[in-house]
Image (cartoon, helix red, strand yellow):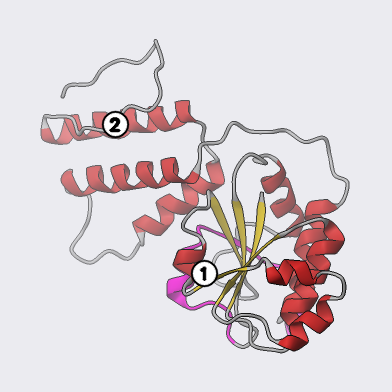
Amino acid sequence: MIHVILVEPIYEGNVGAVARIMHNFGYSSLRIVGAVPSKNDFYLAMHSEHLLDEAQVFPTLKDAISDLDRVIAFSRRLGKLKPIDLDPPELAQYCKKIPHLEIGLVFGRETYGLTDEEAALCPLRCHIPANPDFPSINLAQAVTVALWELTRKADPEIHLPAAPGFELDKMKTYMLDVMESAGFFRSHETTNWENFLAKMLAQLNPNKTMLWRFRQLFNRWHVLTTGKGMGYERTHTDPTDEDETE
């Protein structure tokens, strides 16, 4: 399921316009971080007021995405420190492969987008190509581009048995724990490994067997560096698995 998440929208009418385009394309889950829509938002919703009535309001972005499996932020910024993972067509293909998962599309404030802390909560980033001299696209129009790509007829869908978000978080934590225990981290790290692993797992969309193999790989690394294994709750049984030294 697709959830449209608006972070502290401020301009009157944008939320109503988003609700209307969601209704046009058949999407119904609207989440808002910050304030409840104003009366003018309802006016511009035009036959889509029920989406505003049913919109979920959260105090923070972290709260708004806590129950989601994948989170994708939309960004107009490009650069080495803000890499882009998807454009809108690629976003559509990514989402259509995992229809059984809860997917959040996050749109930042009209004025300055997302803070660095908020962006870090979103493993994947989508960019809508535009005039480099004027790349900022209106909020409602950006949502329109995204939902249109998700809706339009595309190649035959291939569904992936991808693991849910809590399994990816669990694996990310395990990897970081092994890395720390094995002495991987330097005193001054230039790489945010937590963000890197979150992005890698989200891009891979691993199934439970792949997650188990990752567990084997990292556990064996831990055995080789420390002489003992590191426990991890077994969530998938594979008869070909080999136990590691515990």
- In which quadrant will I find the C terminus? top left
Residue 130 visible: no
> Spatial distance from mark 2 to mark 1, Cα to Cα?
36 Å
Residue sticking out furthest to the top: 239
Mark sitting on residue 233: 2
Q: Quadrant of residue 141?
A: bottom right
In the image, 195: left or right of 125? left
Image coordinates of residue 242 in percent, x first then y, are 30, 15
Using the image as rendered, state which of residue 155 and residue 161 is in the foreground. 161
Q: Nearer the viewer, residue 4 or 78?
A: 4
Q: Name which quarter of the figure residue 107 lies in.
A: bottom right
Q: Is residue 212 visible?
A: yes
Q: Residue at x 53, y 69 (%)?
A: 82
Q: Residues within 10 Å of mark 2 (few under 14, many from 20)?
A: few
Left or right side of 212 for 219: left
Q: Which mark is residue 59?
A: none
Residue 26 at what x, y percent from top left? 81, 55
| Residue 80 - label | 1
User: What residue is at 25 percent from the left and 28 percent from the top?
Assistant: 220
> Is residue 122 in the magenta section?
yes
Instruction: Give the secondary structure at mark 2.
Output: loop
**Mark before the other along the chain sequence, 2 or 1:** 1
Q: Is residue 51 above or below residue 218?
A: below
Of labels 2 and 1, the one closer to you: 2
Q: Is residue 231 above or below residue 52?
A: above
Percent of width and height locating residue 139 = 72, 78
Magenta segment? 112-135
Q: Which residue in the rendered view is the most extreme toward the left?
A: 227
The verdict on residue 242 being magenta is no
- Identify residue type, mark 1: Lys
